[in-house]
Image (tube, rainbow, N blue to C red):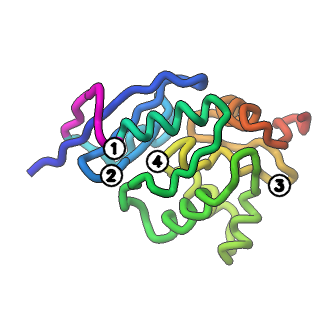
Amino acid sequence: MQKKYAKMLYSSPIGILSLVADDHYLYGIWIQEQKHFERGLGDETIEAVVSHPILDPVIACLDAYFKGKSRDLSDLPLAPIGTDFEKRVWSYLQGIPYGQTVTYGQIAQDLQVPSAQAIGGAVGRNPWSILVPCHRVLGAGKRLTGYAAGVEKKACLLEHEGADFKDRNNRK
């Protein structure tokens, strides 16, 4: 039997977001045309909806976020997807406070992983853009580096939060 997903589009300041859930879990929030867009959904049935018990609270969280209000997202039912390593990294990301940043190297050190590049790979495959804040992860020296939807969108999110970072030319 084929799995069914519900999808809602959300118009945000950084572009159209695709929100996908089933009856139990949020599977992802992807920025249109980002790398890994709707990764893992395959050829499953995806139905556009106007209201959904999982997606409606997600939209409320996104509305609050873009109005500059921090929300506790710990009760959102994230789908149990990803490798054990990815899940560890994504769990770490959830603990990065609004407006704060960490580096890939700091995450590697905190999780006792020998490779910041491995951390970067897991961060880049995070399927819950914005709500699991992979945009708060920077390169060494708080330098703006990679983001699946493009570094300019990452910079917009960080500026929105008032976070301290340096662009690619080491300017604030």
Label for residue 127? 4
Q: Amino acid at mark 2?
A: Tyr
Question: Local crowd at mark 1 within 10 Å, few (<14), some, or many (≥20)?
Answer: many
Label for residue 25? 2
Q: What segment carries the magenta color?
A: 45-54
Give x and y (percent) for residue 78. 41, 54
* Separation of marks 4 and 1 at Cα, in angstroms: 16 Å
Confirm whether the magenta stretch covers residue 114: no
Give the camera-side residue of 117 and 105: 105
Q: Nearer the viewer, mark 4 or mark 2?
A: 2
Q: Earlier in the sequence, mark 4 or mark 1?
A: 1
* Separation of marks 4 and 2 at Cα, in angstroms: 12 Å
Assign a secondary structure to mark 2: loop
Q: Residue at x 43, y 66 (%)?
A: 83
Give the camera-side residue of 10 and 85: 10
Q: Amino acid at mark 4?
A: Pro
Label for residue 54? 1
Assign a secondary structure to mark 1: loop
Label for residue 84? none
Q: Earlier in the sequence, mark 3 or mark 1?
A: 1
Mark 4 and 2 residues: CB-CB less than 8 Å, in contact? no
Assign a secondary structure to mark 3: helix
Give x and y (percent) for residue 53. 30, 41
Q: Dot 3 corresponds to which residue?
A: 140
* Separation of marks 2 and 1 at Cα, in angstroms: 7 Å
Question: Local crowd at mark 3 within 10 Å, few (<14), some, or many (≥20)?
Answer: few
* Separation of marks 3 and 1 at Cα, in angstroms: 37 Å
Mark 2 and 1 residues: CB-CB less than 8 Å, in contact? yes
